[in-house]
Image: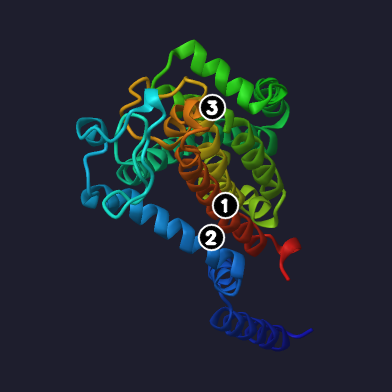
Amino acid sequence: MTMTGRKERLDRLAELVNRDDERGVSLWQEAFRRLRRNPAAIIGAVILTAFVLVALVGPFFVPYEPKDTIGIREGLVKSGQGIIPGASAEHWFGYDHQGRDVFSRMIVGARQTLLVGVVATLIGLTVGALIGGIAGAAAGLGGRWGRAVDNALMRVIDMMLALPSLLLAVSIAALLGASLSTVMIAVGMVSVPVFARLLRVSMIAQANSDYVLAATSLGVRKPKIALTHIVPNSLAPVIVQATLTLATAIIEAAALSFLGLGNPDTAQPEWGVMLADAQPYLGIRPALAIFPAVAIIITALGFTLLGEAMREALDPKLRK
């Protein structure tokens, strides 16, 4: 092939590439386009938007102070005698066993539940991504010594995975003592192995890509390749998993609160605590347990629907 013919071929190839770039979209743009057409994603997004708005804005507009024992003060609630009034025009969800307005406590409890779920997920994501990132970079780029580091870190993760998640969370919470911070740490540590293994596998797959080989051949340092190229291209499944983990974090936080390992101040509204407080009064007012249970289920469902839709939109094997 002559020099002129080769030049014309290269120019034609560049023209085709530029044309594809103009018409093409990024991975995230394509994923967002698929999410907009997915009914499950729309339902999940609506549920989460409503939950976040209630959690952030709702406490400023509650009709009653959530700790105010207004029912007992007015003589309407006598839980010892089995008298706990239900819904009324003034109190939409009725009173609890201490005469507090249940609707106000549900609204304020949404913020507490959101806080616990988000902080716990961030703890798990940060610690898990740190361990998984080091293991993935070591296994993909570190040679023999890197594989040794990867094996050591993964054996720690395997030991954490050997325990059931709820048992591990209960053990950590019992060790640290009952408090809201304990719930966040315990639930966050449970999700560490999931994030660590997911990021590690994604980074190892990216380490075998052509662009990593090209960067290595050009003399780019391996730490820079890992931080500026491999990690950013490996985060998509981790972000999806964070959305799914929020659902399990809310459920596990409620479970710890139900077992008495959460916030010791039961006057502070939180859905798990409200569910635990309602147990002795199921025969009198089952709605006291139904309201927080339904709220937990619907919120977890919203995160799950959106997370599964994101996973399908970002995974080429699951795209329809």
Is the Cβ of the residue at disc 1 closer than 8 Å to that at disc 2?
yes
In the picture of the structure, the residue carrying the numbered disc 3 is 189
Sequence-first tag of 3 and 2: 2
Residue 86 lies, in percent from the top left, at: 38, 44
Disc number for residue 149: none
Disc 1 vs disc 3: which is toward the camera? 1
Residue 33 lies, in percent from the top left, at: 56, 74
Position of 286 with respect to 219 (left or right) is left
At mark 1, the secondary structure is helix
Give the residue displayed 54% in from the left and 27% down from the top. 189
In the picture of the structure, the residue carrying the numbered disc 2 is 44
Inter-mark Cα distance, 1 to 3: 22 Å
Q: Amino acid at mark 3?
A: Met
Residue 249 lies, in percent from the top left, at: 52, 37
Q: Is residue 243 above or below residue 24?
A: above
In the picture of the structure, the residue carrying the numbered disc 1 is 301
Inter-mark Cα distance, 3 to 2: 26 Å
Quarter of the image with the N terminus is bottom right
Sequence-first tag of 1 and 3: 3
Give the residue displayed 54% in from the left and 64% down from the top. 43
Label 3, residues with CA under 10 Å away: few <14, some 14-19, many ≥20: many
Sequence-first tag of 1 and 2: 2
Inter-mark Cα distance, 1 to 2: 7 Å
Residue at the limit of the structure toward the front, as seen here: 81
The image quarter containing residue 179 is top left
Residue 147 appears in the rendering: yes
